Every structure is written in structure tokens, then in C-alpha cells.
Image (spheres, rainbow, N blue to C red):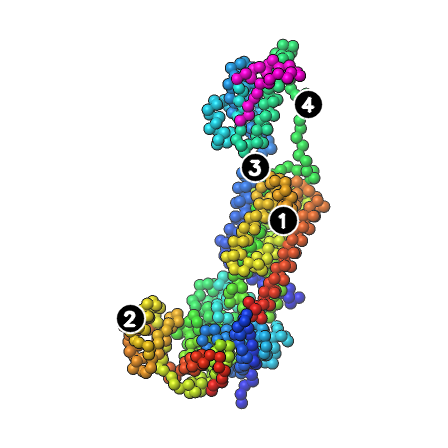
């Protein structure tokens, strides 16, 4: 009971010290909110926006035939493209700047396509898709749309005389395509703000943990550490108080960041709320244990700061805290599963926008909590040993 | 009848790596006594205080406060010690009262008793009016007074002060020694370290002179001094602004090898072979534009004792 009292007392002191620098405290909450909002805005694609699903392309026609002109006109009006005319000279400059990244070129001799017969092995006319080297996905998108448009125009050209002249429905694809988002949750609707608020919250929890560790290192260099060690306070209480204060402030950071996300951008918990709470608590524990780990391994403050920033940025990127981890190469996203950030992100994404239930996110909770426990155990052992060496004059 | 021994160190040995920083140090401090721990830098003063505070563990020897050792009852031992580290051991982001409140609670105080003691201790070090001010806004003197107040809050029988006058001006130093004299009269045992010998003469009942981790002299300041009466006249001063080093070098070169001129922070120490030469040295320093706020020429000094024994290297002895 007495130890608990001492632990709470030390944690309350750190809490008071945190709030003593009000501007610093404010920034601690403001920075993740600003970054999460910025990331969310950059990657936000409203589901109902038609413009967002239209690919910007340039259309270049070198063939003077009526058929080529008709295909070009079809490409200009298709709802899948945001197309405009261009000359061959304009295309080169535009593609170099990715404005846009794709162009469709109907070269001379394109009209020979009208002579095509099913099963013919004769030399086939070509359609050129010009693209920026980084726009391979857009190239494939353009190829699909061009194929659809050209085949429709070809069918109209071949069989048009047999059918009513203005009945476009006749040439519609004989099947309907429906996109179905697949997720373990029943109500999955991706919200880029959900991803960015989960990611930035986790990243700044780790940064807060690091800052707490650096404060601890600073404190150990000061006279207050000697005074505290001379007082009737076991080292375990000092470390527990530090971890408790760090975790408490981290929890407040989570509440503020997600609260802002909810009010401003509709970031909600569509899955298990209990799972969300457990994940947040585990992540706060991870922040606290990271702080003690930084203090235990850091050596000097400057060295600890440099290494910690590098490690936190690394595990944030690999864990998918900045961008979804599926954008990483497969082997890298598999390797990232050895990091607590990847599991925390997977779990938080699951309960926020994927709508996963408690059972589905419990493995994530367990892994993050296990990492926190491992970090904490290692840090406490190291710090106790270091303190023992100090007392005996071995360092 | 002598008052009981409050703090005792017996044959304490401490090693940092391969170097023995304390090599068989023994000393006692009685209740109602102020003992000065003297010695050059690196002689083991701070380590002796850290061992006495229970922050360092000796490899050999015994430490006890009122018969209690840190190993047998760590919490009980800690409650009997008031430790003032060399650096400012306060949270600068908190107010004076908040610092006292926090450290008081660490020592098990709470409620009305804690509030009463905070008020009383602040009054004792004349900081009542600054209770609600952040420590970061305090001058060096105020911080040192609060530093002492934190150590006094739980009313320990033994006070340990590591170079308590390091950041103080002459007025602050005099006030601190007046405080320590009051504490001595209240029955506290005080052990303080300093390498300013005039301070030891000013405020200590006994001095323990350390060199290279060994006790080389113990006794009342005057008695230790008598054993080393081959003193040179010395002048201690406190300058208004610290003169540049090249100025001191120029003064030293002009005065010749018989005169020593040293600056530690804003403290000036002049010594010469005789009083006439000391007068010339003072005149030369003043001629360079160095302004003295205060100065004193102690009747006798322990300087010789420390310096003679420092030069004797590891030779062990007890003087006085």
C-alpha cells in the first residue's frame, strides 16, 4: 500500500511537471492532430465523387480516318476518363511532369482495324499507351478503358447497319460489374482520416515515450536524482511512477487525437469499442515501456535522441503508420509483422473503419501488450543493474 | 558532557573502477556539531557525503546514523538524513511550496502536519514570501536556501551538505552559516564539504581534512592550524566581476613566483611569502581594474595543512 502511494506520488509529480510547460504540453497534443489531419486530407477520396474515379489522359490522333476520329470522340466522352486533345509534342512535356501521367495515341493505320475478322492472324494495327515510368497502374487502367471503347466502336462499325442507329444500349457490355469491398467487418467503409489518425496517434505515442525517457535521462544527471535516491523510496516505485505518468499522458493524447478526429472528420469506432479501448491501453503501455527502454539503453541524451528518432520513424513507416502497409513490397510487410506498430495499426484499423469485432482484434491487443511487457521487463532489469553499479561505484 | 554521536563512518572504502576514492575513511559527527570536510578537488569529499547519505555503498567499512546502518533499515536510515547535493536538487518548474510538498510526501509526511512543516521550514529559511514562486525564477542564493529547506523538512538529526556555498555571494554565505549555527544549536549534526578553508574556519566546530581518499587531519580548525603554523599570509576576496584569465596571468608574471593568485568563480585568493608582498599583490590586482566586493585576511589558515598533506601524496597521518 505504501509503495502504491509512493508510485502515485511520483507519477503525480511527473504529471505536474508536464503541465508546468503549458505550451510544450499543448504542442504535444496539437502536432499529431495537425499531421493526422494533413495526411487524411491528402489521401481522402470521397466515395461519391465521380471526378475522383476518372483518369486524366491526353488523346493524340495521328490517323486521319473517320473511324479513328470516332474512337477518339468516344474516349473523350467516356465517364472513366478525364480526357483532352493534345499533339504529340505536348504529350512528351506533359508526361515528363505527370500532368497527366498517361496519353493514348491512335497512330497512322489505326483504321485498318475495321478490316479485322475473328481468327485473323494478319498484322494488327496498334494503339499506343504512353505513360510516365511511375504510372504503371494508370497505364493498365487506360488500357482497359481503351479496349472497351475500341471494341464497342468496332462492333458498331461491323454490325451497326443491322441495328437501330442511335441505340447505345445494344452495345452495352452483356454483364454488370459490381465492386464489393471485402473485409472481416460488416460495415467496412474506408476513411483515410481513420487511417491517418490511427497512424499518427501511434507514432506520437512512441515519440512521447521517447521524450519521457529523455526526461528521465536528464533527471538522472541532476541533483534531484541524488536527492530522490537518498529519500526512503525504492527504485521500483520511481520507475513505476515514471511509467504510470507516461502512460497516463499518452492516454490523454489518444483521447484528444481521436476526439478531434471524431468531431472534425467522422473518425469512428465501427467495430468493437472494447477492442478499441484495449488497443489504446496496450499502445499507452507500449509508449511508457518505450520511454523506460530509451532511458535504460540511451546512455547520453544526445545519443538516445538520435537513435530513438531513427528507430521510431523506421518502425512507423514499416508498421504502416504513414501509408497503408499493403503499399510495401510483400516481404517487407511480412517482416513488419515482427514490429508492435504493425500489430497496433492492424488492430486500430480493424476496429475503426473495418468494423472488426473483439475476437478479431484480440491477437493485436495481445501482441502489443506482450511487446510492452517485454520492453518494460528489459528496461527495469537494465535500470536496476545500472543503479546497483552506480551505488557500488562500478560506473 | 559531549553529545551523542549521530553519524559515524568507520574504515570506509569506495572504489570507482580501479581507483580507490575513499581508502579507509573514518569520522564521526556528534549532535550539536558542525563538521567541515576539507580537501582539494578529487580528494573524496562528495563521495564521503554520498556514502553517508546512503546513495553510494562502500565496498568495505561501516556507516551508521544513530546506530542504524543503511543496509539494516534503508527507509529508517534515509529518514534520519537530510541530504543537500552539490547541484540544485529542486524541480525548477515547480514552486518552492510544491517542491517542499513533494519531497515531504516522499518522507511520509502528509496532511496538516506536512502543511505546518512546509510553512515553518519556509519561514526558517526566510522564503515564506516566495512560497508560490517557481524555483526557476530564483537566484542562486534563494535556490540554495530552498535546497537546505527541503533537507530540513522532515527534521532529520543529520544534515549532509555538499559544497553548499558554491553558488552564493558573501552575504548568502554568511546567512547560510548563520542558519547552520542555528541548526547546530537545535541539536542537529551537520557535515558539510568545502574547499574554501576560510569557510571551514568561519562555521565549523571541527574539520576533517581529506586527501586522495584518506583522512590526513582531524580536529578543531584552530588546533589543526596550530600544527601547521608555517602559514603564508592569505587574502580571500569576492570580486564584482570575474576578470579575464590573461589579466590574471599578467599579474602573476609581474609579481614573481612568491605570489599565488587564484580565481574560483568570483572568489579571489591571494597568498604571498609575507604581508608586505601580499599588500603589493593586492595593489597589483586592484591596479588592473579588478573590483573587490569584500575581502578578509584570516588570522590563520588551514591552507598549509591541506597543501602540505596534499603534496605528501599517499602518506597517511592524523594531525591535530
Quadrant assignment for the N terminus of chain A: bottom right
Closer to the N terminus: mark 4 or mark 3? Answer: 3
Task: Estimate the spatial distance between the alpha carbons at disc 1 and disc 3, rounded to whole Å.
Answer: 27 Å
Q: Could you tell me which chain the residue with mark 1 belongs to?
A: A
Quadrant assignment for the C terminus of chain A: bottom right
Of labels 4 and 1, the one closer to you: 1
Q: Can residue A65 be seen here? A: yes
| Label 2 environment density (alpha carbons within 10 Å; few <14, some 14–19, many ≥20) | few
Q: Are marks 1 and 3 in contact (CB under 8 Å)?
A: no
Front residue of A110/A79: it is A110
- The residue indicated by pointer 1 is A339
Q: Could you tell me which chain the residue with mark 3 belongs to?
A: A
Front residue of A193/B110: it is A193
- The residue indicated by pointer 3 is A44
| Label 1 environment density (alpha carbons within 10 Å; few <14, some 14–19, many ≥20) | some
Residue at disc 2, secondary structure: loop
Span colored in magenta: A108-130
- Is residue A118 found inside the magenta-colored segment of the image? yes
Closer to the N terminus: mark 1 or mark 3? Answer: 3
Front residue of A99/A186: it is A99
Residue at disc 1, secondary structure: loop
As displayed, is residue B227 above or below residue A244? below
Which residue sits at x=35%, y=82%? B233
Of labels 4 and 3, the one closer to you: 4
Q: Are marks 4 and 1 in contact (CB under 8 Å)?
A: no
- The residue indicated by pointer 4 is A175
- Is residue A126 found inside the magenta-colored segment of the image? yes
Q: Can residue A259 be seen here? A: no
Report the side of B255 relative to A214 (left or right): left
**Looking at the picture, do discs 1 and 3 lie on one chain?**
yes
Task: Name the outermost residue toward the front.
Answer: A122
Of labels 1 and 3, the one closer to you: 1
Amino acid at each position: 500500500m505504501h509503495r502504491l502511494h509512493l508510485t502515485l506520488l511520483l507519477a503525480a509529480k511527473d504529471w505536474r511537471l508536464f503541465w508546468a510547460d503549458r505550451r510544450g504540453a499543448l504542442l504535444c497534443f496539437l502536432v499529431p492532430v495537425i499531421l493526422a489531419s494533413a495526411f487524411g486530407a491528402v489521401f481522402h477520396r470521397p466515395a461519391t465523387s465521380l471526378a475522383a474515379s476518372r483518369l486524366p489522359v491526353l488523346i493524340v490522333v495521328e490517323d486521319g480516318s473517320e473511324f479513328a476520329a470516332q474512337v477518339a470522340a468516344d474516349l473523350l466522352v467516356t465517364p472513366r476518363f478525364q480526357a483532352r486533345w493534345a499533339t504529340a509534342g505536348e504529350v512528351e512535356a506533359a508526361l515528363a511532369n505527370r500532368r497527366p501521367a498517361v496519353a493514348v495515341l491512335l497512330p497512322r493505320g489505326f483504321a485498318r482495324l475495321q478490316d479485322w475478322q475473328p481468327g485473323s492472324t494478319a498484322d494488327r494495327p496498334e494503339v499506343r499507351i504512353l505513360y510516365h515510368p511511375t504510372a504503371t497502374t494508370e497505364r493498365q487502367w487506360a488500357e482497359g478503358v481503351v479496349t472497351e471503347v475500341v471494341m464497342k466502336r468496332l462492333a458498331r462499325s461491323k454490325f451497326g447497319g443491322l441495328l437501330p442507329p442511335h441505340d447505345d444500349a445494344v452495345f452495352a457490355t452483356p454483364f454488370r460489374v459490381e465492386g464489393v469491398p471485402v473485409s472481416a467487418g460488416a460495415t467496412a467503409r474506408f476513411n483515410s482520416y481513420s487511417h491517418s489518425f490511427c497512424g499518427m496517434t501511434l507514432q506520437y505515442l512512441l515519440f512521447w515515450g521517447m521524450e519521457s525517457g529523455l526526461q528521465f535521462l536528464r533527471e538522472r544527471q541532476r541533483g534531484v536524482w541524488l536527492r530522490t535516491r537518498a529519500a526512503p523510496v525504492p527504485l521500483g516505485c520511481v520507475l513505476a511512477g515514471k511509467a504510470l505518468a507516461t502512460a497516463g499522458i499518452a492516454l490523454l493524447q489518444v483521447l484528444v487525437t481521436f476526439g478531434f478526429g471524431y468531431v472534425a472528420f467522422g473518425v469512428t469506432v465501427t467495430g468493437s469499442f472494447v477492442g478499441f479501448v484495449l488497443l489504446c491501453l496496450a499502445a499507452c503501455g507500449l509508449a511508457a515501456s518505450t520511454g523506460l527502454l530509451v532511458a535504460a539503453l540511451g546512455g547520453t541524451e544526445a545519443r538516445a535522441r538520435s537513435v530513438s528518432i531513427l528507430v521510431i520513424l523506421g518502425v512507423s513507416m514499416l508498421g504502416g503508420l504513414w501509408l497503408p502497409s499493403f503499399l510495401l513490397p510483400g516481404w517487407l510487410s511480412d517482416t513488419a509483422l515482427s514490429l508492435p506498430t504493425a500489430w497496433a495499426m492492424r488492430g486500430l484499423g480493424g476496429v475503426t473503419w473495418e468494423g472488426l469485432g473483439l475476437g478479431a482484434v484480440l491477437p493485436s491487443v495481445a501482441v502489443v501488450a506482450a511487446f510492452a511487457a517485454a520492453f518494460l521487463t528489459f528496461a527495469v532489469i537494465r535500470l536496476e543493474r545500472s543503479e546497483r553499479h552506480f551505488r557500488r561505484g562500478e560506473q | 558532557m559531549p553529545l551523542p554521536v549521530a553519524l559515524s563512518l568507520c574504515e570506509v572504502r569506495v572504489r570507482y573502477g580501479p581507483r580507490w576514492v575513499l581508502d579507509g575513511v573514518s569520522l564521526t559527527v556528534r549532535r550539536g556539531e558542525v563538521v567541515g570536510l576539507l580537501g582539494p578537488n578529487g580528494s573524496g569529499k562528495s563521495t564521503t557525503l554520498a556514502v553517508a547519505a546512503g546513495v553510494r555503498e562502500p565496498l568495505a567499512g561501516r556507516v551508521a546514523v544513530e546506530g542504524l546502518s543503511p543496509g539494516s533499515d534503508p527507509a529508517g536510515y534515509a529518514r534520519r538524513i537530510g541530504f543537500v547535493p552539490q547541484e540544485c536538487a529542486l524541480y525548477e518548474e515547480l514552486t518552492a511550496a510544491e517542491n517542499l510538498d513533494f519531497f515531504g510526501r516522499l518522507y511520509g509526511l502528509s496532511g496538516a502536519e506536512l502543511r505546518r512543516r512546509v510553512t515553518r521550514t519556509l519561514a526558517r529559511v526566510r522564503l515564506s514570501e516566495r512560497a508560490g514562486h517557481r524555483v526557476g525564477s530564483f537566484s542562486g542564493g534563494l535556490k540554495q536556501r530552498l535546497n537546505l529547506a527541503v533537507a530540513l523538512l522532515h527534521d532529520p538529526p543529520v544534515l549532509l551538505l555538499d559544497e553548499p556555498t558554491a553558488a552564493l555571494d558573501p552575504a548568502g554565505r554568511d546567512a547560510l552559516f548563520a542558519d547552520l549555527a542555528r541548526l547546530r544549536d537545535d541539536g542537529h549534526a551537520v557535515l558539510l564539504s568545502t574547499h574554501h578553508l576560510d569557510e571551514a574556519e568561519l562555521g565549523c566546530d571541527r574539520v576533517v581534512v581529506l586527501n586522495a581518499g584518506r583522512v590526513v587531519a582531524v580536529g578543531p580548525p584552530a588546533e589543526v592550524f596550530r600544527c601547521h603554523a608555517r602559514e603564508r599570509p592569505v587574502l580571500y576576496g569576492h570580486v564584482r566581476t570575474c576578470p579575464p584569465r590573461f589579466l590574471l596571468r599578467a599579474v602573476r608574471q609581474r609579481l614573481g613566483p612568491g605570489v599565488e593568485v587564484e580565481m574560483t568563480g568570483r572568489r579571489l585568493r591571494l597568498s604571498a611569502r609575507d604581508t608586505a608582498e601580499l599588500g603589493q599583490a593586492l595593489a597589483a590586482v586592484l591596479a588592473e581594474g579588478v573590483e573587490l566586493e569584500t575581502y578578509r585576511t584570516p588570522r590563520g589558515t588551514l591552507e598549509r595543512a591541506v597543501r602540505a598533506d596534499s603534496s605528501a601524496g599517499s602518506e597517511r597521518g592524523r594531525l591535530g
